[in-house]
Amino acid sequence: AQFMSNTIKVGVVMGSDSDWPVMSHAIDILQQFGIPYETQVLSAHRMPDEMFAYAKEARVKGLKVIIAGAGGAAHLPGMLASQTIVPILGVPVPSRYLRGEDSLLSIVQMPKGIPVATFAIGEAGAANAALTAVAILALDDT
């Protein structure tokens, strides 16, 4: 799939700078496919106002999908999903004490009506989230 436009279609956000080593695997995939993307650190707990603003502006900015990685309490993907209709692809980032099982459960257990598509813990999840973003974008590629 090749896009004729350089308009940013994918947001790659994460809860902390420490999530970069995992989330870089999503960025690698997007780069391989030539998908324009933006990255930002958005903490659901330390910067909720910025997080909500990002979610509310996503569709107007032209984003078609957001890949959101977070560890521990991992509220970022779900809180973004509560404020936008742009699909959220949640990536559980491994945590220090529970190897990311806490992150996985936090992201996957969303209430009915607030969907987050949740992927595997860690690097595989980040890569697969990006491949899913590519597939979503390809639906409009004519």
Image (cartoon, rainbow, N blue to C red):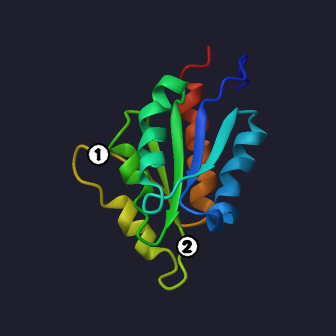
Residue type marked 1: Ile
On screen, 51 above or below 10? below
Give the residue pinned by disc 2.
Answer: 94
Q: In the image, is 96 to the left or to the right of 31?
A: left
Mark identifier at residue 114? 1
Label 1, residues with CA under 10 Å away: few <14, some 14-19, many ≥20: some
> Which tag, 1 or 2, sits closer to the chain's start?
2
Q: Quadrant of the N terminus?
A: top right
Any mark on residue 4, and which?
none
Q: Amino acid at mark 2?
A: Pro
Position of the C terminus, as image quadrant, is top right
List x then y, in percent, for residue 43. Answer: 50, 58
Q: Is 74 rendered above or below residue 133?
A: below
The one nearer the camera, 136 or 47, is 47
Is residue 76 toward the left or the right of residue 66 in the image? left
Q: Position of residue 5 (x, y in %)?
A: 71, 18
User: Residue at position x 70%, y 41% from top?
Assistant: 30
Q: Quadrant of residue 85?
A: top left
Camera-nearest residue between 1 and 56: 56
